Image: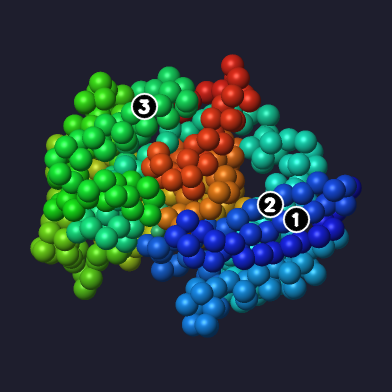
Amino acid sequence: MTAISQVIGRQILDSRGNPSVEVDVVLADGSSGRAAVPSGASTGANEAVELRDGDPRRFHGRGVSNAVAAVNGEVADAVTGLDAEEQALIDTTMIDLDGTKEKGRLGANAILGVSLAVAKAAAAAHRQPLYRYVGGAGARLLPVPMMNIINGGAHADNPLDFQEFMIAPVGAPTFSEAVRMGSEVFHTLRRELAGAGHSTNVGDEGGFAPDFADADEALTFVVRAIEKSGYRPGTDLAVCLDPASSEFFHDGAYVYAGEKRTRAVDEHIDYLLELAGRYPITSIEDPMAEDDFTGWKRLTARAGDRLQLVGDDVFCTDADRLTSGIEERYANAILVKVNQIGTLTETLRTVETAHRAGYRVVMSHRSGETEDTTIADLAVATGCGQIKTGSLSRSDRTAKYNQLLRIEEELGRTARYAGAV
Ligand SMILES: C=C(OP(=O)(O)O)C(=O)O
Ligand SMILES: [Mg+2]
């Protein structure tokens, strides 16, 4: 009954207006699942390959007709007839069919679309929500959201060197209260920005993108918005950063183009720790560049006991890369992005590897997103306790918050919020 009878790939648009892949998987019993694939801008060098046409006549070379053709051709041929409950077998079949380490022949965008659509179809066949099908009876932990309220770096056209300034409602009693608190701060921030004569235009992830000179100015506004909303910075809402440092690491130093100054590795570390001392910062993602292993180790040794240090580009959701970090003692948490690795099975293995080692996990969107909400379910399924999915505006971001609100409602009294446990 759960045999795959049809696999349909198509081209859709993502939130930046770029083509992306969407897949429908239909089973013999008529159940179906649909998944859309996201796309990054500040991508890690070791991410699985997102196959693009490279033909300038097709969407300026950003088209995905080759990846769509792979879904409808080779991948459909290989997985049709397999049992959708056999997620690991299906994912392994696609990995073997591709034959490359980085999924560059068929495209990680093709493979991921099928992988996630298979899981959703199987969940539908079981008449279960995705979080329960993947996570089992114990899946009832709602994540603390890291809400991105100021955008810079590769996600905005402003001079801010750091990519993301986020708030995490750690003191909320429930997920729905967390969303309400975050939305209040977001709107207070808009008012404060407008009052100070700043632009309230938004960046790729829906956070504001004013022409701030540096991180200090952004953090001052963030903390003021928390306070003016009636909350205690650090207690009710903590501050989290993603400088996306790989983007401005050149020739062994951190080049802050917006600030027009360069910091050596240790100066960059000192600066981050100084900011963390002056503001209620609890988590920094990609504080160091993906290839600055010395910097990563130094920062982890200095602050890993008190700050969450999240590896994004440095791990690329790859269990083997994460294992190197665990063995060599850098980072203490990992950002998990399904399209960095390309299948659900590998994603779950990475989460498990992290949890076994006591590394924390943050489920994450990409800067190019769609209305797909799979990561909301995966955050609950894995019980990872944190999700990063953008601002409180833009429907590509609110879709995930809204899905988590539905899950919370469905769980009713049994739902737990990670900030409150
Ligand atoms: C979400 C991020 O951005 P992108 O999708 O552009 O890599 C990130 O760097 O964490
Ligand atoms: Mg990042």
Q: Residue 72: x, y in percent? A: 73, 69
Query: Which mark identifies residue 34?
Result: 2
Label 2 Cα neighbours within 10 Å, binned few <14 / some 14-19 / many ≥20: many
- The image quarter containing residue 23 is bottom right
- The image quarter containing residue 247 is bottom left
- The image quarter containing residue 46 is bottom left
Q: Can I make out residue 367 in this image?
A: yes
Q: Amino acid at mark 3?
A: Met
Q: Residue furthest left?
A: 261
Q: Which residue is mark 1?
A: 25
Q: Earlier in the sequence, mark 2 or mark 3?
A: 2
Question: SS of the residue at dot 3?
Answer: helix
257 lies left or right of 313: left
Say how many tags the image has.
3
Q: Amino acid at mark 2?
A: Arg
CB-based contact (under 8 Å), mark 1 and mark 2: yes
The C terminus appears in which quarter of the rendering? top left
Tell me which image quadrant ligand 1 sits in.
bottom left
Q: Can I make out residue 293 in this image?
A: no
Query: Which mark identifies residue 2?
Result: none
Q: Which residue is mark 3?
A: 181
Real-space Cα separation, disc 2 to disc 3, in angstroms? 32 Å
Real-space Cα separation, disc 1 to disc 3, in angstroms? 38 Å
Does any atom of ligand 1 lie closer than 8 Å to the CB of label 2?
A: no
Question: SS of the residue at dot 2?
Answer: strand
